[in-house]
Every structure is written in structure tokens, then in C-alpha cells.
Image (cartoon, rainbow, N blue to C red):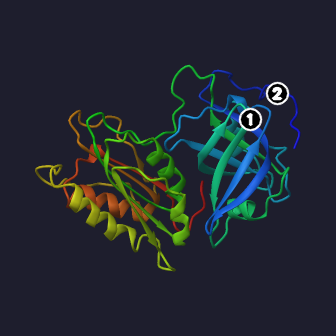
Amino acid sequence: MTLAAPVRPGPQDPSGPFLLHRVRVARRRRISDGFMRITFAGPTLDRFADPGLDQRIKLILPTGEGSLDAMPMCTDWYARWRDLPDETRPVVRTYTTRAVRPERREVDVDLVLHEPCGPAGRFAAGCREGDEVVLLGPNTGCCGESGGIDFRLPPAARTVLIAGDETALPAIGRILAQLPHDVTGAALVEVPNASDGALLPQHPGVRTEVLDRAGAASGTLLHPAVRRAAERLLTPHRAPEPEDVDLDAEGGMLWEVPAEARPDAAFYAWLAGEAGMIKAMRRTLVADLGVDRRSVAFMGYWRAGRSEGS
């Protein structure tokens, strides 16, 4: 596919933390039973930064009629997007970048294929070369940090517990690839198909365990596996007394990334996936096993029965 000459991305702040990019599908490849890798290409993707780790981006899909014409390509896009009528409002979903090649103006994103299939799943399964979408990602021209990274390893932490479901697998893969080699611990991923685990890189000090759900409910295998791993890893890192945990009310946003860990924190946990499951696992770590709450980052990537933004 031949790309147009580089253009400015529209009325956006050139030094802002994030930029919107109108791009096309360049390639798609089934990389496991549960994942499709989509390569997007566009004339402004040389300005798409790649901080790595669990960097969040937005994938903005056309309406049911296949149009992106109503998408506001400007700095205050979100407020304008929310004001759009339902029938013309593009679909917004959150993902993690798999790879960024600014010199080729390409970005790879791994999308989950699952049932029931939502708008992003239908796009992953049925998109064709040349189909248009919009990507929102960190800006190479930003003077400071763009944000959107929630894995924040404390300086003294050399023991980690990383856990999530299939929606967290791309982020976990990038985290493992960038972890310092002297870090030890466990990475647990619960997936619908065992083959999906082959997407995870190996780390010399972190034991990876792929849990094949085999039709069971989300979290059925992951929660007890997290408890077992934590009990094995936590012996030298327990707080004197377990803490009381007051999480957000049912139905609210479940997302907490401690701004500052204890300077001497030796243990760090990162949990992501279905919100109810993450809530239960975080309670196990903090309330039952005595982990300092400042050493646990947890992200409800999705909530059973609800679509993103609802």
C-alpha cells in the first residue's frame, strides 16, 4: 500500500501528550487462537511515541455505516466526541501497543478474538487492507511524560507478581520484555486458549504460568493461582498486619495506580483484566495477605456485561 506524503495531524497541540492519527490497515495476521495482530500505517505515525511497558492507546473505529467523518481530530476531541449523536459517534476502545516502527510509520496492535464479539472483535475478525481507523497515542513531540503507563516498578522492588486475563496479555508481554534481568517473581495469565500463552516472552527470573480457562468463567483459575503465587513470594514482604480495603462501589471504576510506593518496597504487584476479578484479587493481596496497598497497581480493563464507556 502506498501512503500519502506526511501531513500534520490537524488542529492538535503539536507538543501535547497525545496525538490522533487517521490510519489504514496495512496487514492482519492470526497469531494464536485468540489474537489477531493488526498493523496500521499512516502518514503521521512517525510522531507516534513508544514508551513501552503497558502503554495505553485508543483505537477509534468507524460507526456501523463505516464512517469516521464525524470524528473530531483536535486536542479536545473527547468532549466533542461525547457530544456526537449515537448514530455518528465512532467506537472507542483501549489497547496496548505491541510494536511501533516510526521509521516505517507503522503501529502493531494485538486484538482479542472472543465471544460474545463486540465492535473491536468484529473489526479484528473482518477488517481488510485499506480499512480506516483512528489511533490515539503518545506524542514524540511532548516535552514531558505522555502518561498511560501503569506499571511503575519501585526502585527497590526486585520481586514482582504480574497477573491478568487475555485482555492484559499484550501488556504483560511488553512488561516481561522490559523487566530488568535481576527481577524475580511470577507472571500469571488466564486465557481461553492455551496457545495464546506462546505470545509471552521468557524472562530469566520470572516464572510464567498460562492458565487455560477451557470454558470456565473468567477468573476461576486466575484468582486461586494468584493467591498461591503470592503466598510463595511474599514471605519476606508481608506488612505487620493486613489492611482493611475499601474499594470503589460496585459498578464504579476500578483503577488504582499508587503514585508513590514505599522507598524500601521490595515487592510489587500489577493486576489487570475483568474488574470484578481484579477487585477480588487485590483484596486477597492487601486484606488477606498483608501486602502494602502502595505496592499494588490494579486496572479493571473491562467489566462483565458492560462495554467500554458505558
Residue 218 is situated, as x and y percent measured from the top left of the image, at 47, 71
For the point 43% across and 53% down, which residue is it? 254
Residue type at mark 2: give it: Pro
Q: Does 128 appear above or below 81?
A: below
Residue farthest front in this picture: 204
Question: What residue do we see at 40% from left, 42% from top?
Answer: 179
Q: Residue at x 25, y 55 (%)?
A: 286
Residue linked to disc 2: 6
Amino acid at circle 1: Arg
Residue in view at x 50 percent, y 56 percent: 200
What residue did someone put label 1 on?
Answer: 105
Q: Nearer the viewer, residue 145 or 69?
A: 145
Q: Position of residue 290 (x, y in %)?
A: 19, 54
Q: Which mark is residue 263?
A: none
Height in image: 67 above or below 228?
A: above
Q: Are marks 1 and 2 in contact (CB under 8 Å)?
A: yes
Q: For this view, does 127 lie left or right of residue 110?
A: right
Q: Secondary structure at mark 2?
A: loop
Label 2: few (<14), some or many (≥20) within 10 Å? Answer: few
Position in image of residue 298 (x %, y %): 39, 51
Q: What is the crowding at mark 1: few (fewer than 14 residues within 10 Å), some, or many (at least 20)?
A: some
